[in-house]
Image (tube, helix red, strand yellow):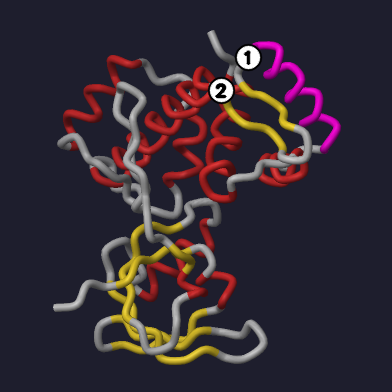
Amino acid sequence: MVSPTIEDYLKAIYKLQKRHGRVTTSAIAEKLTLSNATVTAMIKRLAKKKLLKHISYHGVVLTNDGEQIALKVIRRHRLVESFLKEVLGVDWDKVHSEAEKLEHFISDEILERIDHVLGYPKTDLHGDPIPTKDGEIESVEGNQPLSDAEIGNTVVISCVSDGDPKKLRFMAQLGLFPGVSVGIRDKAPFEGDLFIRVGKYQHRLPREVARDIYVTQAKEK
């Protein structure tokens, strides 16, 4: 049995590893809102359990066992999120915190029933890929933050960060959901706001929010 605390660490490390490659103690501490000392002690514990390896000047890397546990937690989390939204009608800015509580305790049997009821989705409501029950996950290529998209381009939202409910509510107000096309009209200088087009509407989008929206280049028609 793996404790919820260990699952949280492995999930956090997996996400950081996929997003940034290099995973430092301070990055883990920031993501989990813990002290560096607390994280350092847990890293040593996880290394003894052979769930991760610490590489000098690089940080930590999950072992295959550690990654498989992380993917199982992520699968539970994303399926529960989708169930809460699609079946129970919970707002998309609230499902993340609820799924954080349930992901450690839901049984495999109930999870498979949820997967069946949802029609075996490939992605969750925030656009992130859902791992299979065999521990496989589709690779996401070509993603970049909306904040990095060039002026004049049209991009398509592939996924959004689900960690900040206020940002999710703001995205929803502007119609910024996975699958939506966004035109980049202009950018204010000095890391200022973006001016975007969504359908027939034009909006001013804070760069802080744009960094949490990941996009791919729209295909030419």
Q: According to the image, label 1 marks what residue?
A: 50
Magenta highlight range: 36-50
Q: Is residue 155 above or below residue 177?
A: below
Horizontally, residue 48 falls left or right of residue 175, namely: right
**Is residue 42 covered in magenta?**
yes
- Give, as a three-letter code, the residue at label 1: Lys
Q: Main secondary structure of the magenta part?
A: helix
Is residue 91 visible in the rendered structure shown here? no
| Residue name at image x 36 percent, y 34 percent | 80
Rendered image: mark on residue 63: 2
Residue type at tag 2: Thr
Vertical position of residue 40 compared to residue 46: above or below: below
Q: Residue at x 35, y 47 (%)?
A: 90
Callout 1: helix, strand or loop? loop
Pick the residue in front: 168 or 44: 44
- Looking at the rendered structure, the secondary structure element under dot 2 is loop
Q: Position of residue 105 (x, y in %)?
A: 46, 19
Residue, x 66% and y 44% (percent of image)? 31
- 126 relative position to 10: left or right: left
Question: Looking at this view, is 218 or 69 the one in front?
Answer: 218
Q: Quadrant of the C terminus?
A: bottom left
In the displayed structure, would residue 166 be above or below residue 23?
A: below
- Residue 33 on image: x %, y %: 72, 42
Q: Position of residue 63 (x, y in %)?
A: 56, 22
Mark 2 and mark 1 residues within 8 Å of each other at the beta carbon: yes
First in sequence: mark 2 or mark 1? 1
Identify which residue is drawn at 68% across, 19% down.
46
Circle number at residue 111: none
